[in-house]
Image: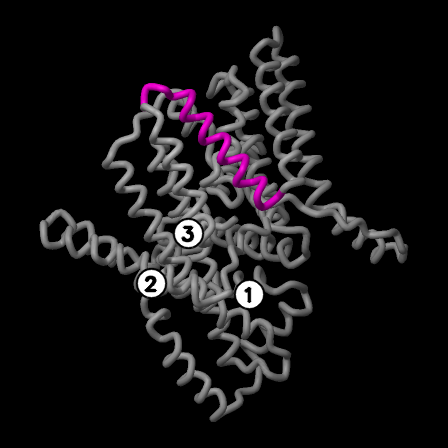
């Protein structure tokens, strides 16, 4: 079940709200049980078999945290943590990477081992990483172990962020799980955030995503430089508003129930460097790798050479986290190379150049990165990049395509570019407290919601890119 579906918008979510708020606020445990029940139902609806994998991961998290709490020695705590993390990595490796490993062993050694057809549970990368962060934080003693297993289950399964993030750290919501206060201001702010996210998804990501899907699916002969660049731009905007829209909806729903999740995107396309981009994009994943991989490896505390090696390790793992495919590994290595160059000399050079130069540089290389990300094989990457930089233009046919694209999608393109900057947000923040502006804001939200429903009813193209991770 996706957030942008009639089943969710008019059946599931209203049922959650009704059952949740009919219970008085002082009955916190009962309200939490409602959220847990509906969260399990949400996952069960889309992944009946995968729910057992998720429940097993939750059980390992709870047992290991309690074992660490009761351990008499540091070694005992280390064993409990190590076994739990190893079990979660094994689960993630089995479901996500077994087939990839067998295929590559066959190719490397000329074998014909049967490739197992393993169905990967939806959102496994997110709920395993979230569970690992809980175990590691208990081990570090930054949070106490949660003695109530139902609350551990609620932390992992909370449906707004269950299958596609953001990755919520336990310390962020530990207190709110036990004692939070829902307010009308939070409910309104959360509802507003949800509608904005739904609009990003339905009115921007989906239309531009259809164009990107068509153009990335063209044959090498049909893919001209003009079409290749349009496809790359459309995919870059699609993945931004697809994922940030989902994050907006997740953060908004969490706030309606009294949870305050951290931001996951802060206008990444206004970046001035690749380093700046990754401070703004999928922040919950970037900080997860920073805090649990990069810093424990030594971060930048053990000299420049070790820092660069740590970056290489982290970004290889980041690429591999996104999927069992060589294009994702190459994508990780690509950004590792850029980040290493910025650490060596490029970052200092960019700081001395005009801001516009850094902005163009960052957007150019981010765009190439999304081409690597979106192509399904190394051969497809080569074909697409060749079309972008060395392909043959179709002349008049290209111009006709550009005219058609601007007529059909020019408004969406213009809106997407505008919304990818903070200009609109700043304008709203400046004027929204005035009475007439509040009325206009409400009308605008209702219009976005209505148009989103019309788009949902009229199109069958409604993917969430990060569901496959």
Mark 3 and mark 2: Cα distance apart in space = 19 Å
Q: In which quarter of the image is residue 178?
A: top left
Residue lying farthest to the right in this orientation: 111
Badge 3 marks a residue whose secondary structure is: helix
Vertical placement of residue 130 versus 351, above or below = above
Residue 365 is inside the magenta segment: no
Badge 1 marks a residue whose secondary structure is: helix
Residue at 26% in and 31% down: 183
Residue 31 is inside the magenta segment: yes
Residue 244: mark: 3
Is residue 399 toward the left or the right of residue 182 in the image? right
Q: Name the magenta segment's main secondary structure.
A: helix
The one of 205 and 384 positioned closer to us in this rendering: 205
Give the mark, 3 or 2, whose residue is nearer the N terminus.
3
Could you tell me residue 381's position as x and y percent? 62, 68
Q: Quadrant of residue 30?
A: top left
Residue 371: mark: 1
Could you tell me residue 348's position as x and y percent? 40, 53
Which stretch is magenta?
25-47
């Amino acid at each position: 079940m996706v957030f942008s579906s009639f089943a969710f918008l008019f059946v599931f979510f209203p049922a959650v709200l009704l059952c949740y708020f009919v219970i008085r606020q002082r009955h916190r445990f009962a309200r939490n049980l409602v959220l847990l029940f509906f969260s399990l139902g949400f996952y069960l609806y889309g992944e009946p078999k995968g729910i057992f994998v998720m429940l097993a991961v939750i059980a390992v998290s709870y047992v290991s945290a309690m074992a660490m709490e009761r351990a008499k020695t540091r070694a005992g705590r280390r064993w409990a943590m190590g076994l739990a993390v190893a079990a979660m990595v094994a689960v993630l490796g089995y479901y996500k990477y077994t087939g990839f490993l067998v295929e590559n062993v066959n190719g490397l050694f000329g074998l014909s081992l049967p490739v197992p057809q393993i169905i990967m549970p939806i959102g496994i990368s997110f709920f395993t990483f979230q569970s690992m962060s809980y175990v590691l934080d208990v081990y570090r003693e930054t949070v106490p172990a949660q003695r109530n297993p139902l609350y551990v289950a609620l932390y992992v399964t909370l449906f707004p962020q269950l299958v596609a993030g953001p990755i919520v750290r336990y310390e962020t919501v530990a207190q709110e799980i036990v004692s939070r206060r829902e307010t009308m201001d939070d409910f309104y702010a959360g509802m507003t955030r949800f509608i904005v996210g739904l609009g990003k998804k339905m009115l921007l990501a989906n239309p531009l995503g259809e164009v990107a899907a068509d153009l990335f699916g063209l044959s090498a002969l049909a893919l001209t430089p003009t079409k290749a660049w349009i496809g790359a731009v459309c995919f870059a905007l699609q993945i931004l508003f697809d994922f940030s829209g989902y994050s907006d909806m997740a953060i908004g729903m969490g706030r309606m129930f009294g949870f305050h999740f951290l931001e996951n995107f802060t206008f990444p396309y206004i970046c001035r460097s690749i380093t700046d981009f990754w401070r703004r994009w999928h922040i919950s994943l970037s900080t997860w790798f920073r805090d649990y991989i990069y810093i424990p490896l030594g971060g930048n505390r053990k000299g420049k050479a070790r820092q660069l090696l740590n970056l290489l390790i982290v970004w290889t793992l980041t690429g591999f986290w996104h999927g069992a495919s060589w294009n994702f590994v190459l994508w990780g290595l690509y950004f590792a190379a850029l980040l290493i160059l910025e650490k060596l000399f490029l970052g200092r050079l960019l700081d001395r150049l005009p801001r516009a130069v850094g902005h163009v540089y960052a957007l150019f290389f981010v765009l190439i990165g999304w081409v690597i990300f979106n192509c399904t094989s190394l051969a497809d990457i080569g074909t697409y990049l060749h079309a972008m930089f060395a392909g043959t233009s179709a002349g008049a046919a290209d111009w006709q395509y550009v005219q058609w694209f601007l007529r059909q999608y020019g408004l969406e393109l213009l809106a997407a570019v505008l919304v990818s900057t903070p200009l609109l947000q700043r304008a709203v923040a400046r004027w929204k407290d005035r009475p007439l502006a509040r009325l206009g804001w409400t009308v605008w939200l209702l219009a976005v919601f209505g148009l989103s429903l019309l788009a949902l009813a009229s199109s069958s193209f409604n993917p969430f890119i990060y569901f496959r991770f």
